[in-house]
Image: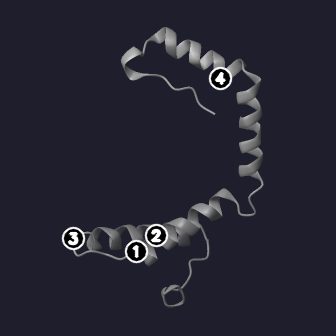
Amino acid sequence: MMIKIDFNQFSGELLNSSLQALLHNSVYKKKSMYYSRLLRSQPISPMNNAIYWIVNTLFKMVHDSTMSVIIIGIRYAVIKALRMSQIRVPDKKKIR
């Protein structure tokens, strides 16, 4: 579902013709609709999916010594933001 453009031959005309092909070719539209339906049929909402990955990344990350201070600060900010938005944040003991 893409049109490959060679960087050495890149021009405004080539970009315009490629975009027109994407917009007006029914094959690209059908594939776009298929992937759109596929993404929309997921059982979890986008917000819950984002929260899941943020929490798992921050709580289950193995820290090296130089990044741990930065990660702790980010973790604190995310937890504070999630609690302010009244979203349930899992207890640290349950995650590990």
Q: Nearer the viewer, residue 71 or 88?
A: 71
- Real-space CA distance between mark 1 and mark 3, rounded to the nearest whole angstrom: 13 Å
Q: Tag on residue 66?
A: 3
Name the amino acid type tagged 4.
Answer: Leu
- Real-space CA distance between mark 4 and mark 3, rounded to the nearest whole angstrom: 46 Å
Residue at label 1? 61
Please identify, in this view, whether the residue under mark 4 or under mark 3 is nearer the observer.
4
Residues at marks 2 and 1 touching, judged by CB atoms closer than 8 Å: yes
Q: Tag on residue 22?
A: 4
Which of the two labelled residues, at mark 1 and mark 3, occupies the earlier sequence position? 1
Which of the two labelled residues, at mark 3 and mark 2, occupies the earlier sequence position? 2
- Disc 3 secondary structure class: loop
Residues at marks 4 and 3 touching, judged by CB atoms closer than 8 Å: no
- Real-space CA distance between mark 2 and mark 4, rounded to the nearest whole angstrom: 36 Å
Please identify, in this view, whether the residue under mark 2 or under mark 4 is nearer the observer.
4
Location of residue 79 in the rendering, given as x and y in whole percent from the top left corner: 48, 72
Name the amino acid type tagged 2.
Answer: Thr
Task: Give me the residue at 41% from left, 71% from top.
Answer: 75
Above/below status of 78 relative to 95: above
Location of residue 19 in the rendering, given as x and y in whole percent from the top left corner: 59, 19
Which of the two labelled residues, at mark 4 and mark 1, occupies the earlier sequence position? 4
Going by the image, does 23 lie left or right of 41?
left
Name the amino acid type tagged 3.
Answer: Thr
Which of the two labelled residues, at mark 4 and mark 3, occupies the earlier sequence position? 4
